[in-house]
Amino acid sequence: MNPIPTRRAALAALVLLLPITAPAAEPALPDVREATVADLAAAMADGRTTSRAIVEAHLERIARLDPRIRSILVVNPDARAIADALDRERAERGPRGPLHGIPVVLKDNVATGDRMPTTVGSLALAGNLSPRDAFLVERLRAAGAVVLGKTNLSEWANIRSTRSTSGWSGAGGLTRNPYALDRSACGSSSGTAAAVAASLAVVGVGTETDGSIVCPSGATGLVGLKPTVGLVSRTGIAPISITQDTAGPMARTVADAAALLGALTGVDPADPATAASAGKAASDYRKFLDPDGLRGARIGVVRAKVYGRAPAADQAFDAAVAEMRRRGAVVIDPADVPHVDRYDDDENTVLLYELKAGLDAWLPAWAPGAPVRSLADVIAWNTAHADRELPFFGQELFVQAQAKGPLTDPAYRKARARCRKLSRTQGIDAVMDRHRLDALVAPTGGPAWTIDLVNGDHFVQGSSTPAAVAGYPSITVPAGDPFGLPVGVSFIGRAFGEGTLLRIAYAYEQATRHRRPPTFPATADLSGP
């Protein structure tokens, strides 16, 4: 990571260049703790602050706080210059949109064609400079966002081992949860979650194959939106699954998630899945935000397989459902998704086949100078550097994926077809059609578990799989913080139903306002929920 110059040193250097009779006072940095996109945009619009000052304030927080949570892999050495250019542009021509001058962090499986490496958390890609920006990064830059830095993640997006520890990577070490430093930030978008929760950036981009946006968001008191597969381009993102991968917003408010989502979407000829989004994506998802959006909404409550194993989360979930009723929602309880336990093996088969095909294509294109050019190379590199790359858990999923054949194999085709049928037409679509639902709601997961590098993660419960396998959207919103540990509720919808989910999630958020900033305690307060 490049060192971040202190403000004192920068000011001293400036003073040496000025006449003694005209000392320049540096403007006070804005308080960016919990500041929203709208807050900061308004402050820039009326001249109370600048993008440069906002960037400096976040860099100061990174330097001071990130050593405790290890969420940032690298700070963009050009962030200040980018902010200065955007400030000049605002003065001359006005803002490009809501993200003009706003600092954003990216999970480090998203390629950037600048001076920041793209490592996917692996030492095998240390120092890798990708030849160009991922499509979504192009979109963010066009929207005027400042890419502030790249965040740690569960290495290779948590597809290396069944006994992994979320948030650990060879390149970045272990990301910790800012709500209790001995607890997991979940994964694989651990660093993005911890950074945004701690106000080290305004918003962030995570990626999900199954749970990697919603789980860390739920565990760190964030709003996390997993879009429909195809709404956001995957070009330039280190892949696991062409069927299930997507990038999405991670933010402290639903409004911020909506603002970021609008900047990420767009049809990309290099990602054929995005063709389905033509005419279905909104240019500005903030238009769906309605504080009365629960009134009349038909919401089905999912309990089977996702409820009953985490009492603190279940209590928060029951209170959330009761609040939805009070706010005028028509609640169908239960409205369980059929077949949720019948495609786990098929999902695993699909992911392993697609991982091998995807990485073998991505590595030569996006990491051309790296010592690895295929999944087989990565396996060999990890074995040769086991002391640094395999100190806590292995790579048996990589080995299983390498043993798979091409995507023309009948076993792959059968598993993929079964996943789609059971998760879509006989799953989410079936229950939503039966009850004429606008959305489903389920507990996002249990409170964050204690970190265990010896035995790996110990999830209690989660609800991400149906939407992940179907490729449908879901959004998690804070629902409480038992023992000081955030938990969330997830709203799940139909393909390209992000607007409906944002409307419902925003109304629930505004009615409850459960979000609390972290205080970085060493451990959770177990004196009572």
Image: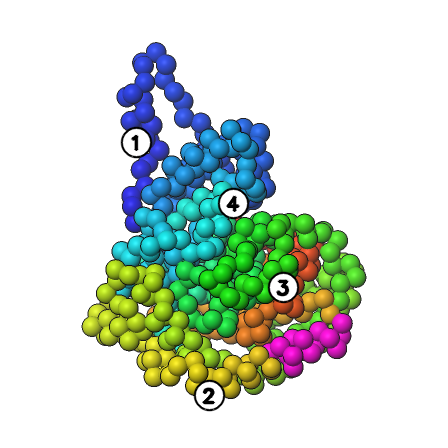
Label 4 secondary element: loop
Which one is closest to the eye, mark 2 or mark 3?
2
Q: CA distance from mark 4 to mark 3?
A: 22 Å
Residue ID for mark 4: 143
Q: Is residue 249 left or right of residue 290?
A: left
**109 to 391, vertically: above or below:** above
Label 2 secondary element: helix
Q: CA distance from mark 1 to mark 3?
A: 49 Å
The answer to whether residue 42 is seen in the rendering is yes
**Which x, y percent locates residue 360?**
34, 71
Q: Is residue 30 left or right of residue 129?
A: right
- Toward the top, the furthest residue is 21
Q: CA distance from mark 1 to mark 2?
A: 63 Å
Residue ID for mark 3: 496
Amino acid type of disc 1?
Answer: Ala
Which one is closest to the eye, mark 1 or mark 2?
2
Mark 4 or mark 2, earlier in chain: 4
User: Which segment did they paint magenta?
Assistant: 423-436
Residue ID for mark 1: 9
Mark 4 or mark 3, earlier in chain: 4
Label 3 secondary element: loop
User: Which residue: 31% across, 37% down?
Assistant: 5
